[in-house]
Image (spheres, coloured by chain):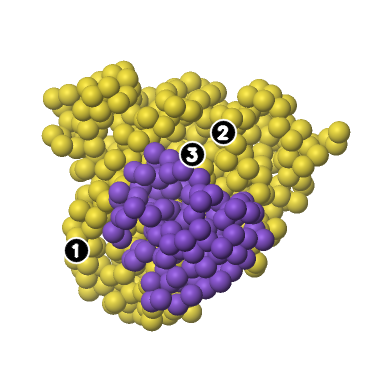
Chain colours: A purple, B yellow
Amino acid sequence: MPNVTYIAPDGTLFDVELRIGQSLMEGATRNGIPGILAECGGACMCATCHIYVERGGDWLSPITEAENEMLNESAAERRVNSRLGCQIRMVEGLDGLVVRIADNH
Amino acid sequence: MTDVPVSDVDLYCDGVLSDPYPTYRALRDAGPVVWLERLQMFVVARYKEVKEALATPSVFISGNGVMMNQAMNDTLKGIVLCSDGAEHSAMRRVIMKPVTPGALRAMQENIYSQAEWLVDRLVSKETFDAATDLAQYLPVTIVSNLVGLPEEGREKMLEWAAANFNCFGALNDRAVSSFDTLKEMVSYALTQCVRGKLKPGSWAEMLHDAADRGDIPQEKASLMALDYMGPSLDTTIFATSNAIWLFATNPDQWDLVRENPSLIPSAINEVLRLESPIQGFSRFAVKEHNFDDLTVPAASRVVVLYASGNRDERKWDAPERFDVRRPGVGEHLGFGHGEHACIGMNLARMEITSLLAALAKRVTRFRLGESKRTLNNTLRGFERLEVTVN
């Protein structure tokens, strides 16, 4: 199972293994990692699972129009490496991915 | 091939509407999909299958309607709720513009200050009706104004919405007696939700701007006002009354929220899971589909029971317990799931959050007085919910 490192807003590191097909958002909420609010449950509608991809994103799926629009709505600053955790599904190639959780409050 | 289990339950009779949960459990236990003899439709009642149906729009379409009777599916043809694919995406993008997280930030201060004012006033009265005095205020004063109907239409929105959701069920007396009111709402949308009659800058007028830009077809602009008129009031109102009822009957959970208001978003999800304001819609299968080893043939209608999936023992630990700290509660299906997930969810959350936050500062206990559930073919909530607070 691919390994992902989440950097919480306070700097704490969480190393977790995610199932293939699981979303980055689910990986965070299932493992009790703070900062990913995921209010809409993964419908790409609330922008509260905003993350910054720090390393290892070669196999990321491209941003869809819906995700792009929702990233513009986020309370947190949008950067070039901004993504929504609910829209990223784990594949083997993402093993070693490092993401920083945006200030979603 | 295994035979699909059959049930002769009437999902829309008074007894089941008053307490649907034993029926839902029986349907879940019967199998992954069940044939409803009375409705002549299939039903999925387990979490996994509810989610699967909602997440597979290539099989389970909305364009033939999402209600449980053909008359209603014909009447509401073409609204966002009852459309598919690229046409649906284009309409959805337009209609959700005023209720995206960014757009709502501009409204937040107004909603929060009105909630503070209202709760202050109600708490000083000590006894009030949470189903009306508390739950109706924000939807009726703020949301109905933003939708922007002419005054006589705005006054009727609550009556229309209740009729609308009664007509979603089986064609029982409740639905049939609501049909004229529903038709009045549809004809109002088509004749009055037009340029010149709508409040300038309102959501309904914005639909016409979108049609002028070519984002949606011109003929949809008035019709789509129904997507604001139907679901923007009652659903949030019932969610609010359900929340107060659950906190009144589970005071330990209210203590947790009072001590830690950051639990409110999760508590709202738990309310929507346990007492879902919208109990279910349907989908039309355009292709054959298997749920485990049971086959739903093409050209069948499938009732999709969100409220049952939300209590599925196969998915949730102690599903009947109200737990504001429940892990993974965000996966509930109270707002639906997939392409048609509730467009207004962010607004609904903001309204309910503002009320609970204001109450958490002032109220230690809700004591229940007289209460009466609404019997509606789709919605679950209270007509009357008297509470005394201290």
Q: Chain of mark 2?
A: B
**Left of B374 or right of it: where is B203?**
left
**Left of A15 or right of it: where is B259?**
left
Residue marked by disc 3: B339
Dot 3 alpha-carbon crowd within 10 angstroms: few under 14, some 14 to 19, many 20 or more = some
User: x, y percentage for residue B245?
Assistant: 45, 65
A37 above or below B8? below
Q: Are marks 2 and 1 on the same chain?
A: yes
Dot 2 alpha-carbon crowd within 10 angstroms: few under 14, some 14 to 19, many 20 or more = some
Q: Which residue: 33% across, 40% down? A: B96
In the current view of this chain or complex, which residue is farthest to the right?
Answer: B1
In the current view of this chain or complex, which residue is farthest to the top?
Answer: B219
Residue marked by disc 2: B57
Type of residue at label 2? Pro
Q: Quadrant of the C terminus of chain B?
A: bottom left
Q: Are marks 3 and 2 on the same chain?
A: yes
Q: Nearer the viewer, residue B65 or A87?
A: A87
- Spatial CA span between label 1 and label 3: 33 Å
Q: Earlier in the sequence, mark 1 or mark 3?
A: 1
Q: Chain of mark 3?
A: B
Instruction: Tell me where residue B146 sits by quadrant.
Output: top left
Q: Which residue: 30% across, 60% down? A: A76
The reply to whether discs 3 and 2 touch (Cβ–Cβ < 8 Å) is: yes
User: x, y percentage for residue A86?
Assistant: 49, 53
B69 above or below A3? above
Q: Quadrant of the N terminus of chain B?
A: top right
Type of residue at label 3? Glu
Residue marked by disc 1: B113
> Which label lies toward us, 2 or 1?
2
Q: Circle 1 sits in a helix, a strand or a loop, which is it?
A: helix
Q: Is residue A7 visible?
A: yes
